[in-house]
Amino acid sequence: MPQTIGFIGLGNMGGPMAANLARAGHRVQGFDLAPASLAAAEAAGVAVMGSAAEAVQGADSVVTMLPAGRHVVQVWDEISGSVPPGTLLIDSSTIDVESARRAHACAGERGCAAIDAPVSGGTGGAKAGTLTFMAGGSKEAFARAEPLLRQMGKAVFHCGEAGAGQAAKICNNMILGISMIGVCEAFALGEKLGLSRQALFDVASVSSGQCWSLTTYCPVPGPVPTSPANSGYRPGFAAGLMLKDLRLAQAAAAAAGAATPLGAEAAQLYALYEALGHGGEDFSGIIRMLRGADSGDAA
Ligand code: NAD
């Protein structure tokens, strides 16, 4: 059934997600601080509003897609005076678990249902409507959110109570950061040993070294033609965003008292890679630093 949806944060991810909701027949009332994002959203069928508070007026549901936890807490605070009680609030940003729980509490005080529903799938998935959503919140809130999430994504999981979606997201991305570094080290070693990339790929992709970082996102050109290694490490998933997620995982591990030594090492290596000026490149490009040469891919 068509809804009125407030959508706040119309950037690289939020813009195309809001456009997909508008395409599905909803009235989408959008707001962003950046005029360029507003113009692009308007062209895609979103009704552009003058503030976050205006965007949520009369809304059945609200989606936020913002850079970090402090933005989400601030915006949910800001809209709490104007959002109708009973509205469903969905935050799809990747943020720290503590801010996600604060946002849930803020929604509860207003009598609103809430879920944290971060995504994986990147800007390509946002445009194509093929994102994966991992959600945290009550069963009732999830049941209300699921049809909307399915109009922006292809896979939707209920992971548990408030904050569980963010927890799933940072755990998954910690696996990804660590496994990418592992695959990069293996290719760098194989090169030194005179092993061809294709030979290593052929063996490892059907052996116990098999993982997504190898078979879908291979960090050297050749074996997987669609991976960013074949196009100069244009993202894809930028190294700076991987660093953000690894830092969120480290903050959560410190707060929870979990030992994540490889996650900590991965965060340090991506911090170094970003400090060398590569934060805007694809995260698989870290192989160039691990080879000990900051020199582009050696053919
Ligand atoms: P982005 O920077 O392109 O978009 C964020 C938007 O929020 C910007 O347009 C900014 O103007 C707006 N904004 C900031 N503060 C605001 C406020 N107070 N009110 C209204 N608008 C405000 O970022 P993005 O790539 O769209 O990422 C958004 C979220 O999704 C992040 O949390 C990111 O970690 C997560 N994410 C991104 C990707 C990706 O590949 N880009 C993939 C998965 C998850």
Image (cartoon, helix red, strand yellow):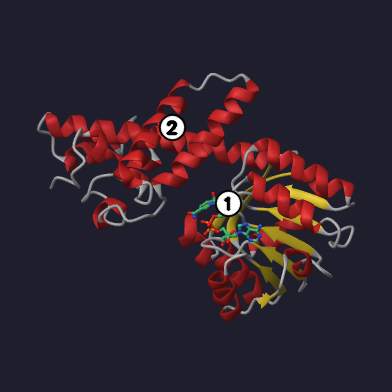
Residue 165 in sight: yes
Q: Regarding ligand 1, which quadrant of the image does it lie in?
A: bottom right
Say whether marks 2 and 1 touch (CB < 8 Å).
no
Q: Earlier in the sequence, mark 2 or mark 1?
A: 1
In-front residue for pair 249/138: 249
Q: Which mark is residue 67?
A: 1
The quarter holding residue 148 reads bottom right
SS type, badge 1: loop
Does the Cβ of the disc 1 residue fall within 8 Å of ligand 1? yes
Left or right of residue 156: residue 224: left
Q: Position of residue 82 (x, y in %)?
A: 85, 62
Question: What residue sits 35% from the left and 39% below the top?
Answer: 275
Let me know if residue 210 appears in the view.
no
Identify the element where label 2 is drawn.
Answer: helix
At x 79%, y 58%, the residue is: 79
Residue 274 on image: x %, y %: 37, 41
Which residue type does callout 2 highlight? Ala
Residue on which the image places disc 2? 267
